[in-house]
């Protein structure tokens, strides 16, 4: 089973590239946001736990998110692989995800990180904000804060997967197809 973490700061192009990778390699998209919404909508035990916490304005605990991911993995046991989106976001989450995947016998295969300069990220997000109507993409101060959060809390995961020999940096500048081809060249070495 091929397990890919597509990684990068807000505005790096993860969503666009995820769609293309899912189609080409027939991977199942695991978005923690989608999983949370689905579990809540279905009224599962984990969904009810998550809703209770979210209703208090708190973050859903890692163990609840990991349990939801485990449920999705087990429900799709015959899949060719998974693409992880939005998780892990901290080293503790990466460790928990690795423990789960080791238990299931399907560790993370590779982490591909889209590398984009901060000025390009800001430009892309402001542009996306004009078209999407998302308020968090229309205010440069909010964008800068999101980039800082990524740099401070999420970027250290690169080191975690580098130590395992699973991290690959991918230049995230150029046409969508150029970036996609760079991603595929790394995947094709393994998949």
Image (cartoon, rainbow, N blue to C red):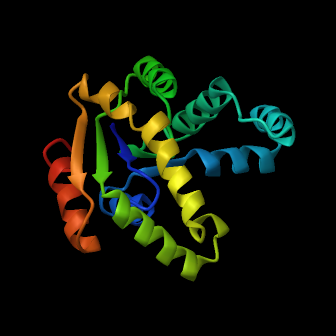
Q: Residue at x 23, y 46 (%)?
A: 169
Work out which residue is located at the far front of the displayed protein and give it.
Answer: 141
Asked where in the image residue 59 lies, by quadrant, the reply is top right
Is residue 18 shown above or below 167? below
Relative to residue 69, is residue 115 drawn left or right? left
- Residue 187 placement (x, y as % from top left): 21, 48
Q: Residue at x 59, y 58 (%)?
A: 142
Count of marks, rendered view? 0
Out of 36 and 94, give the one closest to the viewer. Answer: 94
Q: Tell me the quarter of the image containing the N terminus.
A: top left
Relative to residue 63, is residue 104 drawn left or right? left
- Residue 144 placement (x, y as % from top left): 51, 56
Out of 100 and 92, give the one closest to the viewer. Answer: 92
Asked where in the image residue 82 lies, by quadrant, the reply is top left
Residue 10 is at least partly visible in this image: yes
Residue 23 is at least partly visible in this image: no
Is residue 2 shown above or below 6? above
Relative to residue 181, is residue 142 drawn left or right? right
- Residue 107 placement (x, y as % from top left): 35, 27
Out of 185 and 127, give the one closest to the viewer. Answer: 127
Q: Tell me the quarter of the image containing the C terminus.
A: top left
Relative to residue 15, is residue 50 drawn left or right? right
Q: Residue at x 61, y 33 (%)?
A: 71
Is residue 176 shown above or below 84? below
- Residue 167 placement (x, y as % from top left): 25, 36
Q: Residue at x 31, y 47 (%)?
A: 113
Work out which residue is located at the far bottom of the displayed protein and give it.
Answer: 131
């Amino acid at each position: 089973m091929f397990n890919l973490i597509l990684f990068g700061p807000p505005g790096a192009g993860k969503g666009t590239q995820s769609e293309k990778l899912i189609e080409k390699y027939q991977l199942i998209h695991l978005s923690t946001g989608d999983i949370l919404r689905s579990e809540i909508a279905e009224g599962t035990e984990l969904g009810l736990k998550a809703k209770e916490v979210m209703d208090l304005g708190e973050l859903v605990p890692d163990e609840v998110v990991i349990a939801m991911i485990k449920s999705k993995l087990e429900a799709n046991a015959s899949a060719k692989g998974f693409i992880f989106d939005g998780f892990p976001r901290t080293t503790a989450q990466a460790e928990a995800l690795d423990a789960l995947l080791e238990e299931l016998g399907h560790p993370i295969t590779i982490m591909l990180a889209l590398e984009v300069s901060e000025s390009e990220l800001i430009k892309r997000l402001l542009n996306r904000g004009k078209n999407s109507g998302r308020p968090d993409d229309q205010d440069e101060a909010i964008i800068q804060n999101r980039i800082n959060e990524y740099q401070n809390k999420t970027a250290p995961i690169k080191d975690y997967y580098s130590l395992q020999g699973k991290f690959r940096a991918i230049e995230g500048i150029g046409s969508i197809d150029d970036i996609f081809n760079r991603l595929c060249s790394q995947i094709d070495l393994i998949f």
